[in-house]
Image (cartoon, helix red, strand yellow):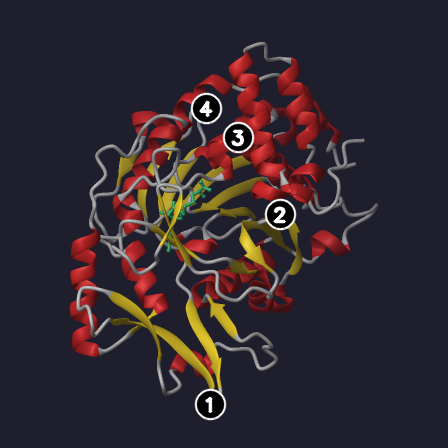
């Protein structure tokens, strides 16, 4: 099977620097975090007072990615001492299995001579670092192919943490703010690594794209069905309490409410993420033109949920309009919308639950191998706890969904038969 049996060896590799990963992930990091809430609130209320209510999308954009005060720009919010924790921060196995997925897609595409690994919103760099460790362990499977790493990250603060994680003190920041590549470095294994603010700046070429908990951070518009038709939900200043924000349904249609609702929409309330739609269209265009695949994993649904906009602060739900800038804002990803935006340019699969995806990728075997080779009771307990968090349907197993976009050739195949798409069906190890 196109040499995929080489991947099999991965499941027999013993512990992979677990103690290093563990230290990195559970270290305290946000002790000196600024609390920018008041200045963000002041800025928003004065803007609303002068020009009227703002869309939820504008509110999210200002709160999360304003270049000066943005929540992502200012903070390291991930981990036990931050506001939320993500799968790659919980267990090394998550990134390892995604590394196997990248390799298997590269193999399924006929092993092109150069592979670009592109990650959107890499957070603390844990996922790509686990992916790259698998690439190092399985470098034999790559033959002579070269690999480069490309990170799309809006946050200078997080890009610095990613650079430290992936290339130690070796990365260089570009001299001018206008450079499309704003930071460059080399990984421990000698692979070139570059940072960008936008996908458009990433070079074209065969690429495997990863986006984990990235699309849920992109701004959404909210709409309510009313007797008069669809109306947009916006953010206004509360007339009773001028330093408080509230939601209002605007009386007249907006450009967004006339353009973003699908004609066959059945729900009473919908959230639409046009920025996510544009990114997916650009990805589809690249994958169709250059070959490759994208794996999008996030909280999500297939066009069924309604009101999912929420805030997280200190691992607890937080009122989305209270002290803006002090909490993460997120909305479930509507995969049915992403599929529509991708159109016919690419083949789409999923969404499938995280539990199914990871089980298909061999998480049970991988856990057994790590446990067999690990005597330390606390590390064993961490491994089991991580596995349970990722796969338990009552924890992250069902809420998180995996969706992929592939070049059509990948499925229509060359002789003898196309390799099954790992994760969406069982990883072929025979
Ligand atoms: N993928 C990581 C982090 C998720 S948090 C993990 O799973 O642990 C969201 C990430 O997306 C952060 O790195 C944040 O800075 C980045 N991000 C948010 N909005 C962005 C945007 N518009 N463009 C690029 N990166 C963005």
Depth check, mark 1 against mark 4: the one in front is 1
**Along the line of sight, the residue nearer the viewer: 3 or 217:** 217
Q: Residues within 10 Å of mark 3 (few under 14, many from 20)?
A: many
Depth check, mark 3 against mark 2: the one in front is 2
- Real-space CA distance between mark 1 and mark 2, rounded to the nearest whole angstrom: 37 Å
The local secondary structure at tag 3 comes to loop
> Picture coordinates of residue 14 (x, y %)?
61, 16
Q: Earlier in the sequence, mark 3 or mark 2?
A: 3
- Real-space CA distance between mark 1 and mark 3, rounded to the nearest whole angstrom: 49 Å
**Along the line of sight, the residue nearer the viewer: 350 or 389:** 389
Q: Quadrant of the C terminus?
A: top right
The local secondary structure at tag 1 comes to loop
**Along the line of sight, the residue nearer the viewer: 264 or 310:** 310
Can see residue 312? yes
Q: Residue furthest right?
A: 416
Residue located at (60% from left, 50% from top): 401
Q: Earlier in the sequence, mark 1 or mark 4?
A: 4
Q: Quadrant of the N terminus?
A: top right
Q: Which mark is residue 398?
A: 2
Per the image, the residue denoted by label 3 is 91
The local secondary structure at tag 4 comes to helix
Q: Residue furthest top?
A: 375
Q: Earlier in the sequence, mark 1 or mark 2?
A: 1
Depth check, mark 4 against mark 3: the one in front is 3
Per the image, the residue denoted by label 1 is 228
Per the image, the residue denoted by label 4 is 21
- Real-space CA distance between mark 2 and mark 4, rounded to the nearest whole angstrom: 26 Å
């Amino acid at each position: 099977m196109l040499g995929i049996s080489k991947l099999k060896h991965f499941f027999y590799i013993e512990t992979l620097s677990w103690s290093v990963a563990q230290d990195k992930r559970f270290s305290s990091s946000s002790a000196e975090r600024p609390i920018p809430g008041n200045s963000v609130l002041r800025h928003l209320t004065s803007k609303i007072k002068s020009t009227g209510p703002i869309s939820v999308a504008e509110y999210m954009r200002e709160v999360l990615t304003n270049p000066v005060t943005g929540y992502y720009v200012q903070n390291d919010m991930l981990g036990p001492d931050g506001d939320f924790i993500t799968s790659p921060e919980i267990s090394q196995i998550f990134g390892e299995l995604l590394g196997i997925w990248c390799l298997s897609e590269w193999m399924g595409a006929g092993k092109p001579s150069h592979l670009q690994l592109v990650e959107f919103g890499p957070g603390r760099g844990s996922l790509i670092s686990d992916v790259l460790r698998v690439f190092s362990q399985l470098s034999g499977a790559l033959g002579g192919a070269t690999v480069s790493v490309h990170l799309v990250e809006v946050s200078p603060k997080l890009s610095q943490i990613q650079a430290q994680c992936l290339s130690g003190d070796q990365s260089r920041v570009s001299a001018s703010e206008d450079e499309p590549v704003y930071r460059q470095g080399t990984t421990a294994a000698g692979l070139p690594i570059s940072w960008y603010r936008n996908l458009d700046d990433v070079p074209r070429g065969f690429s495997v794209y990863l986006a984990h908990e990235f699309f849920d951070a992109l701004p959404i518009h909210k709409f309510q069905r009313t007797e008069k038709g669809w109306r947009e939900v916006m953010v206004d200043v509360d007339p009773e309490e001028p330093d408080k924000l509230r939601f209002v349904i605007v009386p007249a249609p907006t450009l967004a409410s006339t353009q973003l609702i699908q004609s066959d929409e059945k729900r009473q309330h919908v959230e639409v993420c046009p920025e996510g739609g544009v990114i997916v269209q650009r990805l589809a265009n690249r994958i169709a033109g250059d070959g490759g695949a994208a794996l999008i994993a996030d909280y999500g649904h297939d066009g069924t949920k309604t009101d999912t906009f929420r805030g997280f602060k200190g691992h607890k739900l937080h009122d989305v309009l209270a002290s803006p800038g002090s909490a993460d804002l997120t909305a479930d990803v509507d995969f049915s919308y992403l599929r529509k935006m991708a159109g016919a340019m690419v083949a789409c699969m999923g969404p499938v639950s995280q539990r199914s995806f990871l089980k298909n990728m061999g998480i049970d075997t991988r856990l057994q191998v790590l446990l067999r080779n690990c005597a330390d009771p606390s590390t064993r307990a961490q491994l089991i706890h991580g596995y349970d968090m990722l796969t338990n349907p009552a924890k992250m197993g069902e809420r998180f969904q995996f969706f992929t976009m592939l070049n059509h050739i990948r499925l229509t195949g060359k002789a003898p038969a196309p390799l099954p798409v790992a994760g969406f069906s069982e990883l072929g190890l025979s």
